[in-house]
Image: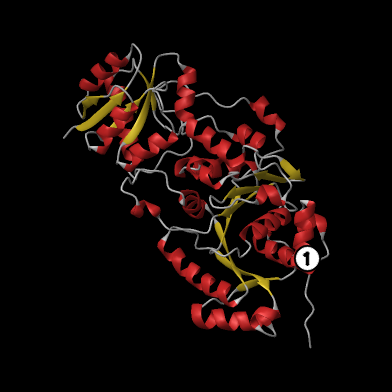
Amino acid sequence: MSRPVVTALTGPGESDLVTALGATADYTVARRCADLPDLLAAAAAGLGEVALVSPDLRSLDRSALHELASHGVVVGGVTEPGDELGERRLRQLGLDVVVRTDIPAPDLEDLLDGLVRERRSLAAPTGGGAQADGGAHGSEADPEDLDVLAAPPAAPGRVIAVWGPAGAPGRSTVALNLAAELAVHGPTLLVDCDTYGSSVAQALGLLDEAPGMAAACRAADQGTFDLLALARLAPEVSPDLRVLTGIPRADRWTELRAASVAQVLEVARQLGAYVVVDCGFCVEDDEELSYDTLAPRRNAATLVALESADDLLVVGAGDPIGLQRLVRAVQDLGSVPSPSSRRVVVNKVRASAVGSRPERRIADALGRFAGMDELSYLPWDQATLDAAMFAGKSLAEYAPASELRRAFVGLTEAYAAVEPRYRRRRRR
């Protein structure tokens, strides 16, 4: 049985490609769409299994390709002969197969067969792929443009998501100081993905109107986002520590779409050996609350960050309410894709909230009611945090000898695999 193909092509070679499709044995043109909305409607109606698009199709972006993939449609690109800029745009949008309009029917059929086989999982498009035989030649980034960067890591960086329940347990504080400590061991990028209350820029004294994550997602959506673009948007605030600031206003959460956030994190792996992501608190899949399941989701940035991360740091507050929220939050993680490598950090630990020997009491409570055995603790030191916030610095810069900073060093050792630099004395 032949597979239906829907096309949204522009240019003089459109009829030639349609003729080549008609000459294949396994593919037939089900609909020739005039624009992107027509193509999306055809995909939603189930009219096609494969879609072919042109680089100059109006409003074509990564979100549109993600929507096509959500309907079970695999997408290929089509360019006119010699259109290298068009092919580069399609590949930056994540299309692995790009063909010319003058391709012979047998070659076209072979490429479409490979596209269907390789993309059977119907995953949303992420980075560009290898050049397919018979298509136009790919164009890579100019090596001279990348000379402005420090030497990127040879292997993909490690993404560490910092997440926790509502109630301000200190997610941003943990993410910032964890990134500052990891920067001692290698290039580190701190990404603010909180769509409810981003605060990394303010904590470091940066302009909250800086483009940051919003600009990165826009570039990824348009297929113009690469390593050089990320380096320009993520300034270096201290040696080997770059920061990609969050959205300045919570009502701009629509700019952080799922496909774009995934692409930003994928490129971020090339910039730093460690990528620390400050996530929002809510992991509710709000698609279920919307009649239009293709509408933007406010929690998409957090859900994508959790799904893309290699490690997860769960932060809870060391008081009765915070511990109860922590237990429920860990249970909620079972309903969303997230790393199996998890570490629970109890922040703001103090005797005034839970009684004497707070660490032992917290360990007993969480072990009994939630089965949490391996815990890390961060002591309460609000005065030092306030002073560091006022100075716009991390604890490593402002109070390197403080007990709280030493606790962060110990937390970092779980990811940097180094010998402990600080050891706590045992009390008799």
Q: Give coordinates of residue 201: x percent, y percent.
A: 68, 47
Q: Give coordinates of residue 329: x percent, y percent.
A: 49, 67
> Residue 416 versus residue 309: which sits nearer the camera?
309
The local secondary structure at tag 1 comes to helix
Find disc 1 in the rendering and name its residue.
383
Residue drawn at x 61%, y 32% as measured from the top left:
229
Q: Quadrant of residue 288?
A: bottom left
Q: Amino acid at mark 1?
A: Ala
Q: Give coordinates of residue 333: x percent, y percent.
A: 46, 64
- Let me know if residue 420 appears in the view: no
Q: Quadrant of the C terminus?
A: bottom right
Residue drawn at x 51%, y 73% as measured from the top left:
327
Does residue 192 appear to the left or right of 287 in the view shown?
Answer: right
Q: Quadrant of residue 243?
A: top right
Does residue 82 appear to the left or right of 373 in the view shown?
Answer: left
Q: What is the basis of the colouring in this image?
A: secondary structure
Residue density around tag 1, few if under 14, some if 14–19, many if 20 or more, within 10 Å? few
Residue drawn at x 34%, y 37% as measured from the top left:
68
Does residue 326 appear to the left or right of 15 in the view shown?
Answer: right
Q: Quadrant of the N terminus?
A: top left
> Residue 187 versus residue 68: which sits nearer the camera?
68
Q: Eyeballing the image, is 35 above or below 358?
A: above
